[in-house]
Amino acid sequence: MKFRSAVVALSLLAVLLATAAPVMAPPTPIIVPIKQAQFQCRLWNPPGWSYIYQNWATTMELTLTGKTLHSTISYAPAVTNEVGTSTVYTYNKDCDCWIQHEGTISYTSPYSGLTITEYWRGYLKFDGTPSASSFIHGVGYQWGYVYGDDPRWYYTNAVWDEKVGAWLLGFSIYLWDTGTQSYSIPFPDPFLEPVPASNYNPLGL
C-alpha cells in the first residue's frame, strides 16, 4: 500500500509501498484513489491527540494474488536496521473484507537512535473483487513501542505497558474512504492506552 500523503509514524513519515507477492497466480496491481484521515496520539510533553487531519487525497497501491493483498512499509526520512514488513491482508468471508491481523515492523529511529517496534492491524472493504473502483472503506491501527531501556529521556511521557512488556510511545488510527470524510470522534485527552477495540475496532482485530 502506498500513500502519497504524509503518514506520520511517531516522528517519522511512513509511506506504504507495493511489494511483489509470491507468484501462485498472476499478481494484479491495484491503485485506489482515496481520502485519508489520521488521528494520532504522541506521548511527548504533554501527551494527547497531537496530529489530526482528514480528507488527504492520496492513493493506495496493492498487489492482489488470489485471496491475498500484499504491501510493504518504508519510511522517510530513511530508517536503519528495518526488520519485518507485515502488511498482508487476507480475505475473510464471514465479514466479507480483507483483514490485516497484527503485523510487526521494527527499525532504528534516525532521531532518537532508539529501536522502535510498530504493530499494525486493520482491514479493507471492497464491493466484490478488489479493484480501483470497488474499494469502500479501510481502517488501520498503529502502535509504537520501545523494548528494553526506559526511553523517557526522549519520549518524555512514554507509558509502560505491562501486557506488552514495553514502553508505549504513541498510537494512530487511519481511516480510508473514497468520498469526503466528516468524522467527529470524541477521543480522550490525555490519551494513554490504545482505543478500546469495542469502540473503534468492530471486527476485534
Image (cartoon, rainbow, N blue to C red):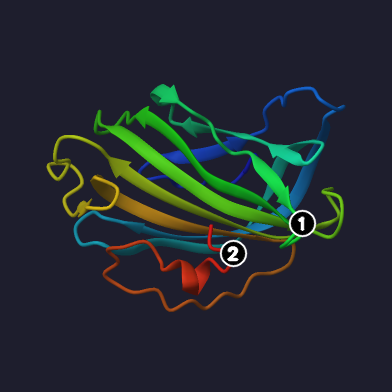
- The residue at 27%/52% (across/down) is 163
Q: Which residue type does callout 1 highlight?
A: Lys
| Residue 186 location (% of width, % of height) | 43, 79
In the image shown, does 114 or 147 lie closer to the viewer? 147
Quadrant including the N terminus: top right
Label 1 to label 2: alpha-carbon separation: 13 Å
Q: Quick one: 114 or 76, which is closer to the camera?
A: 114
* Secondary element at image label 1: loop
Image position of 98 (left or right of 155): right
In the depicted structure, whether residue 111 falls above or below residue 130? above
Circle on res. 198? none
Q: Quadrant of residue 52?
A: bottom left
Would you place residue 44 above or below residue 63 in this image? below
Residue 113 point in image, percent of width and height:
25, 28
Q: Give the mark, 1 or 2, whose residue is nearer the N terminus.
A: 1
Provide the residue designation for mark 2: 203
- SS of the residue under disc 2: loop
Horizontal side of 120 relative to 95 (left or right) equals: left
Asked whether 101 or 83 is in front, the reply is: 101
Tell me the amino acid under the disc marked 2. Leu
Q: Residue at x 32, y 28 (%)?
A: 110
**Residue at 73% over, 49% down:** 91
Contact, CB < 8 Å: mark 1 with mark 2?
no
- Residue 110 versus residue 122: which sits nearer the camera? 122
The residue where tag 1 is placed is: 93
Say which quarter of the image contains residue 149.
Answer: top left
Relative to 182, residue 48 above or below: above
Left-right relation of 72 to 144: right
- Tell me which residue sits at (83%, 29%) in the image: 27
